[in-house]
Amino acid sequence: MTRPGGRVLITAYGDPSQFEALHYFLSATRAVVPDFEGPAEDEPFLEFQVADPDVLRQRLIDAGLRDVTVDTTQKERVEVRSGRQFWDWTLGGNPIPGLLVADLTERQRADIIGVGTKETRVDGGR
């Protein structure tokens, strides 16, 4: 809720196909667990359901906001120094990755962290 004439700021993920950090996490997981399915392609997670700027704009208008502008020019850049730091950033910033790897063993998790040490820079999305 905002006062008349107030402003609303929303930070949202962009197109999941452009979310390098997610793809890196999934590929590191698949390197250790080849049959790992990852998220369903046909049912985007809640965080990605407003990835399309037109969808987000329309939902805000439907919620009663006026003069809605969706600015997609900002892109988060994440720099990590180790697989552990990437793992912690990924699991600490959103509950979904934790749900995706909930059934993995501690050894598999450690191996994924090991894969993550090979690259230190990924885009975090929008």
Image (cartoon, grey):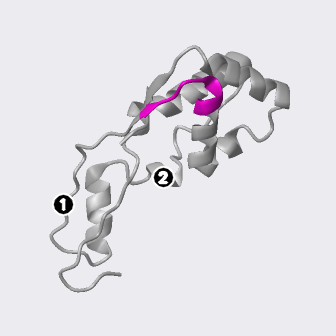
In the image as oriented, which residue stretches furthest toward the left? 67
Label for residue 29?
none
**Is residue 34 among the parts visible in the rendering?**
no
Q: Quadrant of the N terminus?
A: bottom left
Residue 31 appears in view: yes
- Is the residue 76 above or below the residue 7 in the image? above
Query: Looking at this view, is 47 or 82 the one in front?
Result: 82
Do the numbered discs 1 and 2 sit on residues whose CB atoms are within 8 Å? no
Amino acid type assigned to the residue bearing label 1 in the image: Thr
Q: Position of residue 82 (x, y in %)?
A: 59, 23
Q: Is residue 81 magenta?
A: yes
Give the CA distance from mark 1 to mark 2.
Answer: 19 Å
Q: Is residue 71 above or below residue 89?
A: below
Q: Is residue 103 left or right of residue 119?
A: right
**Label 2 sits on residue:** 47
Range of residues picked out in magenta: 78-86
Residue 95 coordinates in the image, percent (x, y): 63, 50
| Residue denoted by label 1 | 69
Residue 67 sits in quarter = bottom left
SS of the residue at dot 2?
helix
